[in-house]
Amino acid sequence: MRNVNSLTVDGFMEGVIQRNRGQKEFHQAVAEWAHDVIPYVNENPQYQDHNLSERMTEPDRVILFRVTWQDDAGRFQVNKGYRVQHSNAIGPYKGGLRFHPSVSLSVLKFLAFEQVFKNSLTGLPIGSGKGGSDFNPKGKSDQEVMRFCQAFMTELVHHIGPNTDVPAGDIGVGSREISYMFGQYKRLAHEFTGALTGKSLEFGGSYIRSEATGFGNAYFMQEMLKHHNEDIDGKVCAVSGAGNVALHCTQKLTELGGKVVTLSDSSGFIHDPKGINEEKLAYISELKNVKRGRISEYAEKYGCDYHEGKAPWRVDCDLAFPCATQNELDIDDARALIKNGCKAVSEGANMPTTVEAMHALQEAGVIFGPGKAANAGGVAISGLEMTQNSMRLSWSAEEVERRLKHIMRDIHDKCAQHGKNGDQVNYVKGANIAGFIKVADAMLAYGVM
Ligand code: NDP
Ligand code: 2IT
């Protein structure tokens, strides 16, 4: 049904671009969503007349601040700090912090926007936020990272809290950074409350949180394949990245019988046709998290190929898992994957596939799991860390992983329901619409705000 208030996707996007000039990553994330949601709103009268799409694309607030810290030589350094509090319609603002030189308002706004629908899909009461800094932890000493984290939290503490906004990790923010920030938070807030997730087990962390995004991505692929009478067992898998998400995704894929043959970092990728087994994975984990070395060192140790400056998408594989960063898989990569017989792609990273590449994969019949569904396992277990903190108890690793599996299956089924297209499933559409409905219903119930 169309009425006078029907929107066109192009008309809607014109307004978004006008109001957010130059923010190309944000435009990209909104355009991908609008492609599915605007027609859905036009067909469902209960969502018309409330300008929901425009309201959903404007963050509640953006906090921007200076972070001053001293390096080891005693020099004063300045970075930008951000927190985008996008929506608390269904729970406290919730989402990661990214420390990387490429961090900009556009990048954080795209991430916060996608987080709204991802968090909704988990079924848990969590709203959306994202933040971070253009600080580059690479090459910094532990002491420098600590001083930066403390300086960053000295401002952020005013804006977060267990019922207000609960940040976590993302690129460049792992256990070390969360520990420094939580230490400073509890000192300044003068209370021990779960205002950050991804904490260590000794001080309020949850079992399986560090594994959850990668494990969840493997489980999501397992569900998509099951739905198409296929299985991970025996499949050759290409994974990109060598961080938290990539390594835990590799671990779970291997446990499920897959053979992971690639990993990468921002310098290049390794191709190990024998497969990255448990022992090799332990080596990379130490290399990346303790020595903070480069993936090329793996090729030297295990005598396999290393491709400088390239991504792993030209390698023969059945399944692909982009787990590094945004727009790391473009149209040429998609064509190579299609040509090499890739059956399915599941996004561990946020928006790693360009829009053109995503459409090419879908048109070629490659099963495509979008990040806002496939990588939701991380924030889901963050949600369960908040639950455990509120209850002041700790569930076992088995209990948390059981819940993670259940949540990933439930997200899959919601996507399959709303993305059904004949015998096929459009998981992108399913995730966008299923994520939208819960937030839209909450906003309608609140009235004008
Ligand atoms: P990490 O910092 O642990 O690892 C990031 C990995 O990606 C590193 O191997 C890094 O290589 C590589 N990388 C980063 N930037 C680039 C770039 N510009 N070009 C090529 N490679 C790059 O981050 P995570 O594993 O936590 O995050 C990876 C992705 O997953 C991100 O998109 C993040 O938003 C998403 N995600 C993370 C979640 C989490 O719980 N951590 C939850 C959901 C999604 P190098 O070391 O050379 O920089
Ligand atoms: O993109 C993401 O979902 C994350 N970086 C995790 C967010 C969280 O709050 O655990």
Image (cartoon, rainbow, N blue to C red):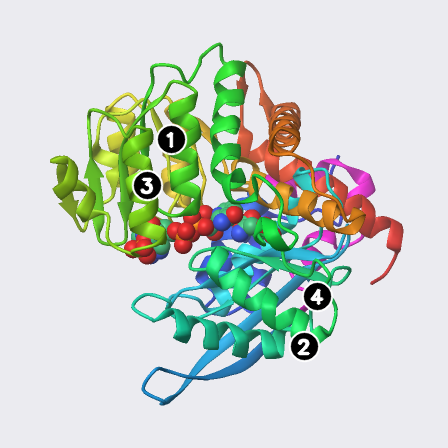
Q: Name the residue located 67 percent from the left edge and 69 percent from the top edge.
A: 186
Mark 1–mark 4 distance (CA, rounded to whole Å): 34 Å
Mark 4–mark 2 distance (CA, rounded to whole Å): 25 Å
Amino acid type of the residue that numbered disc 3 sits on in the rendered structure:
Ser
Please give the range of residues in magenta.
Answer: 36-61
Mark 3–mark 4 distance (CA, rounded to whole Å): 33 Å
Q: Name the residue located 29 percent from the left edge and 68 percent from the top edge.
A: 139
Amino acid type of the residue that numbered disc 1 sits on in the rendered structure:
Leu
Amino acid type of the residue that numbered disc 4 sits on in the rendered structure:
Asp
User: The N terminus is located in which quarter?
Assistant: top right
Number of the label disc, if any, that sits on residue 203: none
Q: Is residue 13 visible?
A: yes
Residue under label 3, please give it: 240
Mark 2–mark 3 distance (CA, rounded to whole Å): 38 Å
Mark 4 secondary-structure assignment: loop
Estimate how packed mark 1 is, as few (under 14), some (14 to 19) or many (20 or more) residues with alpha carbons within 10 Å.
many
Marks 1 and 2 in Cβ contact (< 8 Å): no
Amino acid type of the residue that numbered disc 2 sits on in the rendered structure:
Leu
Estimate how packed mark 4 is, as few (under 14), some (14 to 19) or many (20 or more) residues with alpha carbons within 10 Å.
some
Could you tell me residue 341's position as x and y percent? 28, 21
Number of the label disc, if any, that sits on residue 60: 4
Q: Earlier in the sequence, mark 1 or mark 4?
A: 4
Residue under label 2, please give it: 188
Marks 1 and 4 in Cβ contact (< 8 Å): no
From the image, give the main secondary structure of the stretch colored magenta: helix
Mark 2 secondary-structure assignment: helix
4 or 2: mark nearer the eye = 2
Residue under label 1, please give it: 361
